Amino acid sequence: MKAPKRIFILALAGILLASIALDREVARSSQNTVPRALMARVRESTDAKALALGNSLIGVGFIEPSFDQGMGLDKRDGATNLGMGGSSAVEQLLMLRYALRQGMRPRVVVFGFFDFQLTHPLEYATRDLIGNRAMLYYMEPEYARAFYHLSLHDRAEFEIMRHFELFADRGEVWQRVELFRRRLARQGMPPEQANSMGRAVDFAMLEYPSAPAFVAECGRASRNPLIPSVHEIALQAKAAGSKVYFVEMPMPPEHVQMFYDQPEWAGYRAHLQGMLDDLGATYIDASHWMPAENAFEDPLHLTYEGGQQFSRRLGEYLRNIVPTR
């Protein structure tokens, strides 16, 4: 065999072996990702009488002991919080289905949301399926694909990527690179405002840029149906014997005044309430429950103390309308 060809084959073999080793290392290091940790939590909490679903607003804002105290639940069979930052209703549907398959039969399912999350269509590219959304690669991938849109190119890419941990859980590698990059970028700069969820500036970018833009979206969203994954959460939880509550989460006073106090939002809220009523679910408007600015640690998330107050009040509210025994 000629030397150049031998070198090429050896280099190719080396790349292949390195890729296999890296794939195995990512598989090992990703065993404690948030979705997998929550799956393990579900297996230990099958007696839970209340289940909370949603993104980071529920993840940090739903405090289980406070909710249990408000609702009068025992610690041994109290609430289980499956909220995940950076997730959509598709991932939350998969978590609900996993909990039901493990034998959990909660009396109450709480789904927290803000703005237009219940009606905004989900269109992804494979680059979006990272972090907690990586569970779409390994948790009922064929079933989940019916609830979000991928282009033809991304569908083909998805089918390849989901068979390799190196691609499916690439966020395990990328988050380390990103944290290192941010540390370097902050050298000699003033400290950034951050909390347990990340940088406050990142969450500010999730808000609408102006009241007119928000009002215009209210008009469009008021013509939209519930996205299919939300529809399924309501139906599947109800079929399992749960009372389902969609909670418009508390927002800081500035967000409420600029957006939620608009009459167009009231029209959109009525649109949501009608659709949820048809599914046997209940809408709870908790957006004004926490009027103090210091109850929030950034433009969207409650502080721990704010979460305790909200969770206790939610538990008390539900205690009056849901039997727990």
Image (spheres, rainbow, N blue to C red):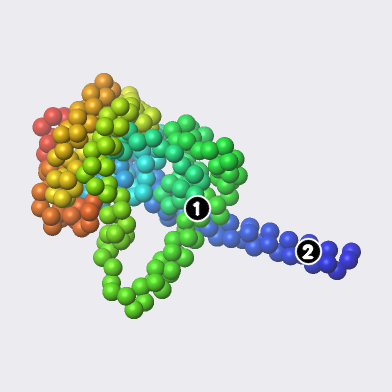
Which quarter of the rendered picture does the N terminus lie within? bottom right
Residue 283, by quadrant, is top left
**Residue found farthest to the right:** 1
Image quarter (top left, top right, bottom left or bottom right) of the C terminus: top left
The x, y position of residue 261, in whole percent, is 14, 40
- Helix, strand or loop for disc 2: helix
Amino acid type of the residue tagged 2 in the rendering: Phe
Question: Residue extending furthest front?
Answer: 212
Q: Amino acid at mark 1?
A: Asp
Residue ID for mark 1: 169
Residue 142 coordinates in the image, percent (x, y): 52, 34
Residue for badge 2:
8
Q: Is residue 299 left or right of residue 145?
A: left
- Which of the 4 quarters of the picture holds residue 226? top left
Of the pair 98 and 133, the residue shown nearer to us: 133
Figure check: 303 above or below 57: below
User: How far apart in space, not on screen, are marks 2 and 1 (Cα)?
Assistant: 29 Å
Q: Residue 130: horizontal and vertical position, in percent?
A: 46, 51
Residue 55 appearing in the image: yes
| Circle 1: element type | loop
Q: Position of residue 212 (x, y in %)?
A: 23, 42
Relative to 11, is 145 on the left or the right?
left
Q: How many marks?
A: 2
Whichever of labels 2 and 1 marks the residue nearer the N terminus, that label is: 2
Q: Residue at x 27, y 47 (%)?
A: 208
